Image: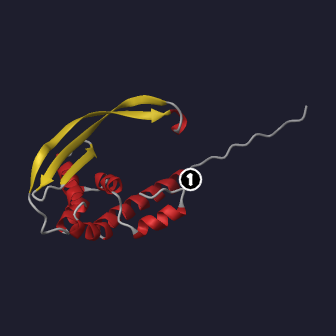
Amino acid sequence: MPNPSSNTARDESSAAPPERAQWLALFARATRDELDDAIAHCPDAPEFVWLRAPQTGLVLVQGRVGGSGDRFNLGETTVTRCTLRQQDGVVGTGYVLGRDAERAARVARLDALMQMPQHRNALATGPLSTIAGRLAATAAQHDADTAASRVEFFTMVREA
């Protein structure tokens, strides 16, 4: 995902294919149907073997005081992860919040496919851009809902 504080970064990223961290973040937040649609774009995908079958565990979540201050331990959350290797040697990894092993497996599969040049462009311009668009629309709606309930406070100075 491009840096929102830089219009130049946004313009450059729309022309270039997304980097691995960006596509993994988008796939991790995609629905199961969106992931199935993306996999359907690659009917000639090679077979794979599990290096680490989907497994669920806990990870520690950290927060920051005021959003940018000192770190503190916020709590734990459930995460499912897996890793696979395709016949051609490409390794794909999937992490998703929650206990959905099928979604994690699909994310790992798509991660491996995105590393293959013959699939990368089709996935980036089709399903990945659809997922990014849905997430952006959801974020914009959330921002609009938040702005509608914003209260402005002001203080009047009294003369003594």
Residue located at (45% from left, 28% from top):
72
Q: Position of residue 5 (x, y in %)?
A: 54, 56
Location of residue 37 (image quadrant): bottom left
Residue behind mark 1: 147
Tell me if I can see residue 99 in this picture. no
Q: Position of residue 33 (x, y in %)?
A: 23, 60
Q: How is the image coloured?
A: secondary structure
Q: Position of residue 24 (x, y in %)?
A: 30, 53
Tell me if I can see residue 58 in this picture. yes
Residue located at (18% from left, 52% from top):
91
Q: Position of residue 110 (x, y in %)?
A: 22, 58
Question: How dense is the environment of label 1, judged by Cα within 10 Å: few (below 14), some, or many (20 and up)?
Answer: few
76 or 110: nearer the eye? Answer: 110
Relative side of 39 to 24, left or right? left
Residue located at (53% from left, 38% from top):
68
The C terminus: image quadrant:
top right
Residue located at (66% from left, 46% from top):
152
In the displayed orientation, state which residue is furthest to the front.
89
Relative side of 69 to 18, left or right? right
Relative side of 150 to 50, left or right? right
Q: Secondary structure at mark 1?
A: helix
In the displayed orientation, state which residue is furthest to the right.
160
Three-letter code for the amino acid on which mark 1 is drawn: Ala
The N terminus: image quadrant:
bottom left
Position of 120 relative to 101 (above/below) = below
